[in-house]
Amino acid sequence: GAVVSQHPSWVICKSGTSVKIECRSLDFQATTMFWYRQFPKQSLMLMATSNEGSKATYEQGVEKDKFLINHASLTLSTLTVTSAHPEDSSFYICSARGLAGGSTDTQYFGPGTRLTVL
Amino acid sequence: SQQGEEDPQALSIQEGENATMNCSYKTSINNLQWYRQNSGRGLVHLILIRSNEREKHSGRLRVTLDTSKKSSSLLITASRAADTASYFCATGFSGGYNKLIFGAGTRLAVHP
């Protein structure tokens, strides 16, 4: 149990285009989902926290208009990178927290999406 | 930044040896969690220790927490080549939807 999927697993796009990444909790309802960004050989940096039906809470320094987050249901959150530029190239990872049978303090992570902007 | 620090940044050992990784953090926490990440993959949750706990075991893993020193350690006993991965500690807070702040990570290489 407690499986989180992400789609796509990798994407290459041209500079200036927008890219949408989906995060789904497959076998539990996620009351909260988190989006992280990870550069090569570095740690995960929390970008934003999203709760179903409400606006996302962004960490300091993260542009809300550039990284649009929608948490439309208890099993789906999306991250849209708008007008992507090469510096947005990174590994984006989502996690979900909810009633998965274990501690609600535990976050279950998706496999990540590697974004490359040309 | 609230991000904690981990040491060592990299650790290289032989199979069968024990591996110890340390994590320090800066603020009061609700819990501390350890995660594993294979190269270019997602994170796997290893163990969670609450602020009122001092030690926890899971299989070959042993985690300690010293809230007075704001530090934790992860011990992997009898390491295997399959343990090769990056290990991250993450501190959890009672507010802010239980968000996690990750440490810098330790890259562990276990040689056959």
Image (cartoon, coloured by chain):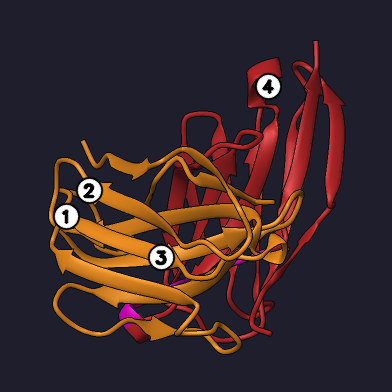
| Amino acid type indicated by mark 3 | Thr
Residue B16 versus residue A26 in the image, above or below: above
Kindly check if marks 1 and 2 are in contact, taking CB atoms under 8 A apart as contact: yes
| Amino acid type indicated by mark 2 | Ser
Look at mark 3 in the image and give the residue it sits on: A80
- Judging from the image, mark 4 belongs to the subunit labelled B
Q: Nearer the viewer, mark 4 or mark 2?
A: 2
Q: Is residue B102 magenta?
A: yes
Q: Using the image as rendered, state which of residue B27 and residue A76 is in the foreground.
A: A76
| Amino acid type indicated by mark 4 | Ala
Q: Using the image as rendered, state which of residue A28 and residue B92 is in the foreground.
A: A28
Q: Nearer the viewer, mark 4 or mark 3?
A: 3
Which residue is drawn at the image coordinates 45% and 84% (left, top)? Answer: A65
**Sequence order check, earlier mark of 1 and 2:** 2
Look at mark 2 in the image and give the residue it sits on: A25
**What residue span does the magenta drawing correspond to?**
B97-103
Which residue is drawn at the image coordinates 41% and 65% (left, top)? Answer: A80
- Image coords of residue A111 (percent x, y): 45, 40
Tell me the distance, in whole angstroms, between the alpha carbons under discs 1 and 2: 5 Å
Residue B107, quarter of the rendered image: top right
Q: Are marks 1 and 4 on the same chain?
A: no
From the viewer's perspective, is B7 left or right of B3? right
Q: Residues within 10 Å of mark 2 (few under 14, many from 20)?
A: many
Q: Nearer the viewer, mark 1 or mark 4?
A: 1
Colour that chain A carries in the picture: orange
Which mark identifies residue A75? 1
**Sequence order check, earlier mark of 3 and 2:** 2
Residue A35, quarter of the rendered image: bottom left
Q: Nearer the viewer, mark 3 or mark 2?
A: 3
- Image coords of residue A38 (percent x, y): 63, 57
